[in-house]
Amino acid sequence: MLGWELPPHNSGGLGVACLNMAHALADQGADIDFVIPYTAEHENVDFMQVIPATNLDPIYRYGGGSYESLDVNAKIIPANEDARVSIRDVQEKYCDFINTHLMDFKPDVIHAHDWLTYEAGILAKKRFGVPLVAHVHATEYDRAGMHVGNPLIHEIEYEGLMLADEIIAVSEATKRIIHEKYHIPLSKIDVVYNSLDDSYLKSDYEYDNSTYEYLTGLKNDGWTIVSTVGRFTIQKGLTFLMRAAKEALTKNPKLMFIFAGDGEERNTLINLAADYGISRNVIFTGFIRGQKLRDIYSISDIFVMSSVSEPFGLTALEAAHHGDALILTKQSGVSEIIWSAFEYDFWDEKKLADEILAIAANPALKQELQENIKTEYRKISWEQVAKKCLKIYNNTIKHKR
């Protein structure tokens, strides 16, 4: 497996998905070497070998999902080197490692996650003849709000998808984008949905009332808490959510909107809240993880995924597990497996406002949505994901021979 991050050294959901997928595959008997572009301890990972490709500091330290930025040549500062390097420098070092590593070791199959590792996967296939499975968690079209985005990233994605023996897409929506934008035959693409982080299902988590005491007080006074979690980028459609918040607050002033995360649109969103005169009803938490993130889900009544294009959307499943009613854009992959959620087109802030108001005004509706969603997200497991991946691996290896 070629990946770019693993918890706890991750900046988003990609690392979480990779970890859970690999764990489930190991439980099914797969022997996995997971190559990462940095050096760090992963103390709780005993089911596979984690192999560092460089001596750089963990990628999350580069901050804010910068490896998905339009400027992939932006300089970053590794902790243990004097010289500054760019994402392209890290990718080059990563490829150099794969080139050396595979001289002594030839795996049955290479599973490469997203554009960051596709070049290394292509190298492995071309030079060493290893079958290549390309996993698409997001395309540059998604990250750029359904525009072409960075032409270099687009080129890397196109070459990786063209040369891959098989492609895994995280949703039918992503499969359509791969087919329509990259002209890949549908027969080459398999849809494998993500599942919920195992730690959510297995832990006896309890909400800490002291974490967000102010919000607890508001709820006791009849307020409704609306939250969203993710990177503040154009892909997430948060400016549309802010406009919907303004619309909803004209009819129900007892709404508090929580924006949990960080990113390039942070100042834009703060200024929008001020310009709309709703700053007192909007809270920005900054980047959070662990218990603080779970507490946000737990204190919330409604979780909104406002993405312009969201290949899947694990945060929606996490929010559902903690009892939130969900409002999802029709442009999110997770909406393909969750039916007991309100939906809207990302640009339709009036409809989003109406849906927020409807749930806030009707406790029985909110309870029905919460209960039905819990039965739906449990139908997909990482065990099922692993079995599908193994089938894809075996077919790929068989056809390669």
Image (cartoon, rainbow, N blue to C red):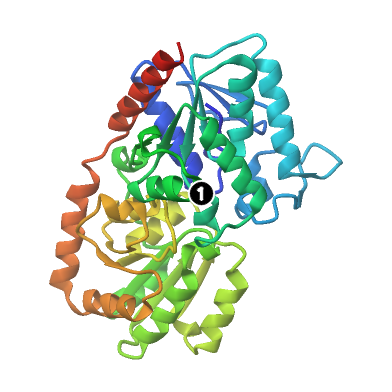
Count the labels in the image. 1
Please give left or right for residue 66 compared with residue 13 in the image: right
Please give left or right for residue 33 compared with residue 321 in the image: right
Name the residue at 37% across, 86% down: 247
Percent from the top left, x then y, of residue 378?
A: 23, 43
Which of the 4 image quarters holds residue 220? bottom left
Residue 159 sits above or below residue 72 on the image = above
Q: Nearer the viewer, residue 218 or 338?
A: 338
Please give left or right for residue 98 compared with residue 304 in the image: right
Percent from the top left, x then y, of residue 209?
A: 36, 62
Q: Is residue 56 visible?
A: no
Name the residue at 21% across, 55% down: 373
Location of mark 1 (residue): 139
Name the residue at 61% across, 15% down: 128
Q: Is residue 51 visible?
A: yes
Percent from the top left, x then y, of residue 16?
A: 46, 40
Find numbered disc 1 in the image and state the secondary structure of the residue it sits on. Answer: loop
Which of the 4 image quarters holds residue 223? bottom left
Disc 1 residue type? Thr
The C terminus is located in which quarter?
top left
Q: Nearer the viewer, residue 43 or 4?
A: 4
Percent from the top left, x then y, of residue 240?
A: 44, 75
Q: From this viewpoint, which residue is outermost toward the right?
A: 82
Residues packed near mark 1 inside 10 Å, few (<14), some (14 to 19) or many (20 plus) = many
